Image: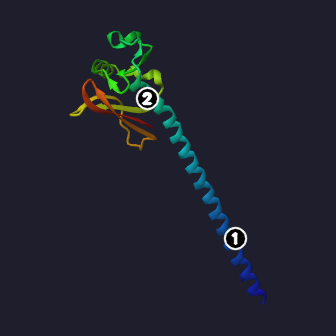
Amino acid sequence: MLGQTKFEFIFTVVIFAIIIFFAVSQINILFTAIITDSTTDIAKTISTPVINFLLKDEGEPPDWESDPLNAEWVGLATKPFVLSKQKVDELQNDCTLLNIYNLGEYNLIIYNKTHMILSCGYESLEIPKSIITKYVFVDNDVGNVTLKVW
């Protein structure tokens, strides 16, 4: 009888330890998911206003492409979602103009209907935290703009 009680006690302790281990591992998984969701939300919070600003505003001054060194901020639009090819070309020449937006690690790509006309930033092997694609007109061509943020 004493040997059987000892076996039941050991069996109960092992089962209890397995349950505690499982509960602790689930808590860890839950917090990892919450942290991932919050970094994704932060990236979206940063990238959404930036892409909207680039696609809806002319920048300051409105003709910043003629003197990019004096640009206070960069906007690519002549009208909302109608981009100036001259501004896009000037931004292609100097992507550091986007540093004012503090995007961190990003990739901005603009396509017209046939090919890529702008690529700023870099491509990462990691999955982006935020990807935003908007359709635009570049002068009179249909195109799209994609902003990825890591």
Kind of residue indicated by mark 2: Asn
* Neighbours of disc 1 within 10 Å: few (<14), some (14-19), many (20+): few
- Could you tell me residue 138's position as x and y percent? 28, 26
Dividing the picture into quadrants, the one containing residue 98 is top left
Which residue is painted at 54% across and 45% down in the image? Answer: 37
State if disc 2 and disc 1 touch (CB < 8 Å): no
Front position in the image: 18 or 134: 134
Kind of residue indicated by mark 1: Phe
- Could you tell me residue 125's position as x and y percent? 38, 42
Visible in this render: residue 112? Answer: yes
Front position in the image: 32 or 88: 88
For disc 2, the marked residue is 52
The residue most toward the right is 2
Q: In the rendering, which numbered label is found on residue 16? A: 1
Which residue is painted at 26% across and 23% down in the image? Answer: 139
The residue most toward the left is 114
Q: CA distance from mark 1 to mark 2?
A: 54 Å
In the rendered view, how is the structure colored?
rainbow
Which residue is painted at 74% across and 87% down in the image? Answer: 4
Quick one: quadrant of the N terminus? bottom right
Identify the element where label 1 is drawn. helix
- Is residue 31 toward the left or the right of residue 86 in the image? right
Q: Compare marks 1 and 2 and give the one earlier in the sequence.
A: 1
- Is residue 4 toward the left or the right of residue 135 in the image? right
Quick one: quadrant of the C terminus? top left
Front position in the image: 72 or 4: 72
